[in-house]
Structure formats: structure tokens, C-alpha cells
Amino acid sequence: MKNPLNHIRSIIAPIVNYFIDQKKSASFRKEVKASSDHLDFENVFNSMGLAGNLYDQLKRKVHPDREMQESKKVIATELAQLISENKRDYNKLVELKNRAIEELNIEFL
């Protein structure tokens, strides 16, 4: 009888490899190279399913043109750039969302 874990790995490995190949973010590639012995599968699966919606929400809420104060506009510009660079990394987007809530006083529903 075949080992069920090998079967699961044979299904998940191509999906994960495809997902990694599709990454265009240089920071994600650096992170994977730095920790090649450990891959956060939870973040990979969250990124596949949830990152797109969070990215869309963040890019609208954190857009620099929404800010009137110059100091907040500078922060919003920096956050918008980071959001764009990490649009497929769910964990990083959650960190940036929390930073936007703290620094820009943005409310999310």
C-alpha cells in the first residue's frame, strides 16, 4: 500500500512550485532562498487564496491621493509601494494593513 503522505506531497509539490515560479516579487525570491530548508505552507496557501482580495482592498484604502496632510501622503506613498511589491505575499500584506491602521488611522470593515 502506498504511503498517503507521499500521495499528498505529490499533489501539493507541483502546486507550490507553480506558485513560487509565478512570484514576481524580488523580496519573495530572497526570502525563499534565505530559508530554502523551510517554506511556510500556510502563507503559500493563504497567498494563493486570500492575497488578491487583501491587495485590492489595501491599494484602494492606502492610495496617496486619499490623504490631505503631506506627512500622511508620504507614509501612504511608501505603503502603496510596499503593497505593490508584496501583492502576492499574504503575511506581508497583513503586516502592511496593520501598519496602515496605526500610521494612517485607516478603518477596514
Image (cartoon, rainbow, N blue to C red):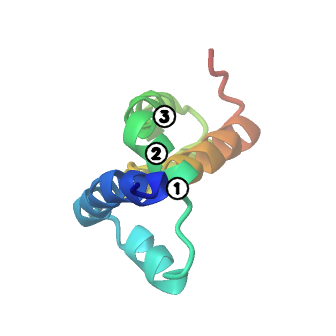
**How many other residues sit within 10 Å of disc 2, few (<14), some (14-19) or many (≥20)?**
some
Residue under pointer 1: 41
State left or right for residue 94 relative to residue 25: right
| Image location of residue 85, percent across then percent down | 39, 59
Quarter of the image for the N terminus: give it: bottom left
Say what amino acid the circle numbered 3 marks: Leu
**Residue appearing at x 32%, y 51% in the figure:** 11
For the image, the number of numbered tags is 3
| Image location of residue 73, percent across then percent down | 54, 44
The image quarter in which residue 63 lies: top left
| Image location of residue 34, percent across then percent down | 52, 85
- Label for residue 58? 3
The image quarter in which residue 22 lies: bottom left
- How far apart marks 1 and 2 lie (CA) works out to 6 Å
Say what amino acid the circle numbered 1 marks: Phe
- How far apart marks 2 and 3 lie (CA) works out to 19 Å
- How far apart marks 3 and 1 lie (CA) works out to 23 Å
**Residue appearing at x 46%, y 45% in the figure:** 45
| Image location of residue 28, percent across then percent down | 42, 68
Assign a secondary structure to mark 1: helix
Assign a secondary structure to mark 2: helix
Residue under pointer 2: 45
Question: Looking at this view, is 98 or 75 the one in front?
Answer: 98
Say what amino acid the circle numbered 2 marks: Phe
Residue farthest along the right direction in this orientation = 102
**Residue appearing at x 35%, y 73% in the figure:** 26
State left or right for residue 27 relative to residue 13: right
Looking at the image, is 25 positioned above or below residue 61? below
